Image: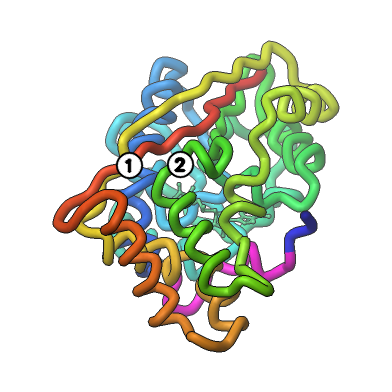
């Protein structure tokens, strides 16, 4: 599947909903995981790519008070949302940057981190080569990617519902992009082609909490680029499609607070 350009647009009302609903539901557990792996390396300078609204930045800033963190993202509105809760932190520098063309000199950072961003790179080898270029000798690249959508409960229910609501042309952003790059051999080959070695890939499973089926549906349908894709389909419209996802989630996981499985690959390379 070729990803349309809209897959990488996190703007409009998406950053705020993403920050409030998506981050605690599926990104916070992996942010803690990634920060723990990085902490022992005690980096002086750390670059975060595709930092979004600061899920990992927040944890890193707390765990590594002596590290200078350069937090970057392609979409300035995501960084603007991150700054609403991290602006006062003097250890964080914010900069808009495309992972495929990093505006930093060679060997500028001890660690490069990227949480759930690599799937969005139109050319992963190029993105990885850029990460490698800016890492100092002896440094490491830490990142993660989602496993198959079938291993991620809420996302899978949402995608199945899209097939029912829009049978002739279902929005497939979630399956195509966030859950579209999970083959360990392909990831290893891409990293090797970019010049990395000592590659470790680990499957990590967590539980994903949501306040309600409605919250989870709102997060997936309106707090991601899925929103634009659903709107582009016309009838029955964004609100009705979100409601159908909420009904499907409630039917499977119940009313009130719900919980589902999430699974990802966590990767590090030297
Ligand atoms: C799923 S979000 C992850 C954000 C954050 N790391 C987190 O854990 O919440 C993906 C992020 O990748 C960013 N992105 C997409 N393409 C990018 C690129 N070429 N370079 C840098 N960031 C990119 C998006 O703007 C978005 O913030």
Residue tagged by mark 2? 152
The residue under the point 54% across, 39% down is 146
- The answer to whether residue 27 shows anywhere in this view is yes
Q: Vertical placement of 177 versus 262: above or below?
A: below
Residue 12 inside the magenta-drawn segment:
yes
x, y percent for residue 94: 49, 56
Of the pair 26 and 72, the residue shown nearer to us: 26
For residue 56, side relative to residue 73 (left or right): left
Q: Quadrant of residue 60?
A: top left
The residue under the point 46% across, 33% down is 263
Give the magenta range: 4-14
Of the pair 136 and 20, the residue shown nearer to us: 20
Q: Which label's residue is closer to the chain start, 1 or 2?
A: 2
Image quarter for ligand 1: bottom right
Q: Vertical placement of 25 versus 140: above or below?
A: below
The residue under the point 45% across, 25% down is 204
For residue 136, side relative to residue 22 (left or right): right
Residue 8 inside the magenta-drawn segment:
yes
Q: How many marks?
A: 2
x, y percent for residue 213: 27, 60
The residue under the point 32% across, 59% down is 216
Residue tagged by mark 1? 260
Q: Quadrant of residue 188?
A: top right
Q: Quadrant of residue 33?
A: top left
User: Outermost residue toward the left?
Assistant: 256
* Helix, strand or loop for disc 1: strand
């Amino acid at each position: 599947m070729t990803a349309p350009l809209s897959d990488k647009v996190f703007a409009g009302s998406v950053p705020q909903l993403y920050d409030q609903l998506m981050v605690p539901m599926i990104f916070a557990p992996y942010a803690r995981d990634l920060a723990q792996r990085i902490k022992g390396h005690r980096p002086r300078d750390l670059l975060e790519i595709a930092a979004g609204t600061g899920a990992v930045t927040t944890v890193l800033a707390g765990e590594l008070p002596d590290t200078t963190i350069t937090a970057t993202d392609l979409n300035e509105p995501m960084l603007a949302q991150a700054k609403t809760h991290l602006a006062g932190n003097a250890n964080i520098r914010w900069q808009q940057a495309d992972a495929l063309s990093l505006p930093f000199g060679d060997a500028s950072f001890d660690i490069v981190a990227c949480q759930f961003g690599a799937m969005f790179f139109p050319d992963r080898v190029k993105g990885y080569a850029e990460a490698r270029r800016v890492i100092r000798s002896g440094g490491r690249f830490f990142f993660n990617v989602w496993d198959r959508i079938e291993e991620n409960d809420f996302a899978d229910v949402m995608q199945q519902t899209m097939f029912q609501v829009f049978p002739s042309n279902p929005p497939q952003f979630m399956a195509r992009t966030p859950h579209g790059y999970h083959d360990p051999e392909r990831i290893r080959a891409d990293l090797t082609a970019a010049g990395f070695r000592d590659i470790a890939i680990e499957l990590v499973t967590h539980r994903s909490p949501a306040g309600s089926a409605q919250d989870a549906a709102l997060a997936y349908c309106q707090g991601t680029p899925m929103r634009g894709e659903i709107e582009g389909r016309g009838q029955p419209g964004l609100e009705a499609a979100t409601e159908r996802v909420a009904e499907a989630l409630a039917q499977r996981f119940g009313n009130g607070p719900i919980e589902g499985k999430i699974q990802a690959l966590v990767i590090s390379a030297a």
